[in-house]
Amino acid sequence: MDNINGKFIDIHGVEMVFHTRKGDFHALREINLTVAKGEFITLIGHSGCGKSTLLNLIAGLLKPSDGVLLCANREIGGPAPERAVVFQNHSLLPWLTCYENIYLGVERVFGVSENRTQLRDRTRAALALVGLGAAETKRPNEISGGMKQRVGIARALAMEPKVLLMDEPFGALDALTRAHLQDELLKIVAKTESTVVMVTHDVDEAVLLSDRIVMMTNGPAATIGEVLEVKLAWPRDRVVLAQDAQYGLYRTAVLEFLYRKQAHPAREAA
């Protein structure tokens, strides 16, 4: 986006090996990637290529077997409020209301420095940001799947993270709801100027949302195969882009990588 500047996330020489009963599994090898402040990055690749593993490494939920990950020039040594995660499953506590689910996170992050009124205002502002101010007293079983996912996004944004990490947040939703939330996400990111790293399987979603698309090779020992810079003007309108020739070229480039180079890597090499 227009506010991109500087190196904010720096991933250098990262390897990830899982030690299992059946032996060592080499999930990722030689991952090198930098993400600028305010940039929207999507990770795409076939199942098992380590996209979620890489996201969890950036989140600090996993520690690399080798290499280093930095955020704002500080080594990522574990989870922190500066890096919020939105999972494919909304992960809301079913006995709490939408408001209470968000307030719980807000209190943990800002409870020492802010009073109750400030915490309540912060929680309601997050709900308003995703258009759910009227649903604050509802519990998860009383709202739709798309609304649940919006509460999850609001909970992450309420902590004012420097980095928003998203693991296929719209993957389980129907096409219309997914399209609506993609558009909402673009507006929210433009307003908050968040740095975003998002895992997706959806080629159209990747092209619509991204500044750059990071394409992963097949696992095991997956790595970054290609990085595609998406030079489409912001803000983006999906209806207009559907007729845009450049959009079609970006989409074809990703499909070429996924379904020609990665579907038949040996044949491609030959």
Image (spheres, grey):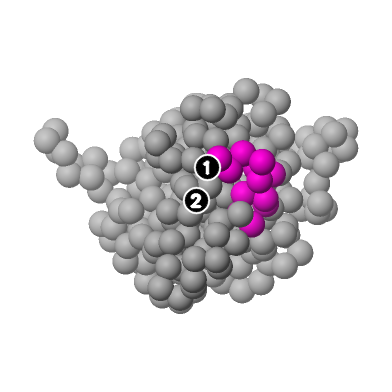
Residue span colored magenta: 125-137
**Which quadrant holds residue 111?**
bottom left
218 in relation to 191, above or below: above
Between 155 and 83, the residue placed more toward the observer is 155
Q: Is residue 131 magenta?
A: yes
Q: Residues within 10 Å of mark 1 (few under 14, many from 20)?
A: many
Instruction: Report which residue position mark 2 lands on.
Output: 102
**Is 16 placed left or right of 33 in the picture?**
left
**Is 210 placed left or right of 107 in the picture?**
right
x 70%, y 25%: residue? 176
x 33%, y 38%: residue? 220
177 in relation to 254, above or below: above
**Is 64 placed left or right of 187 in the picture?**
left
Q: Are marks 2 and 1 in contact (CB under 8 Å)?
A: yes
Instruction: Look at the image and tell me whether residue 27 can be seen.
Output: yes
Helix, strand or loop status at disc 1: helix
Q: Residue furthest left?
A: 21
Residue 95 at x, y percent in the picture: 40, 36
Q: Amino acid at mark 2?
A: Ile
Q: Amino acid at mark 1?
A: Cys
Which mark is drawn over residue 98? 1
Q: Main secondary structure of the magenta part?
A: helix
Residue 210 at x, y percent in the picture: 67, 49
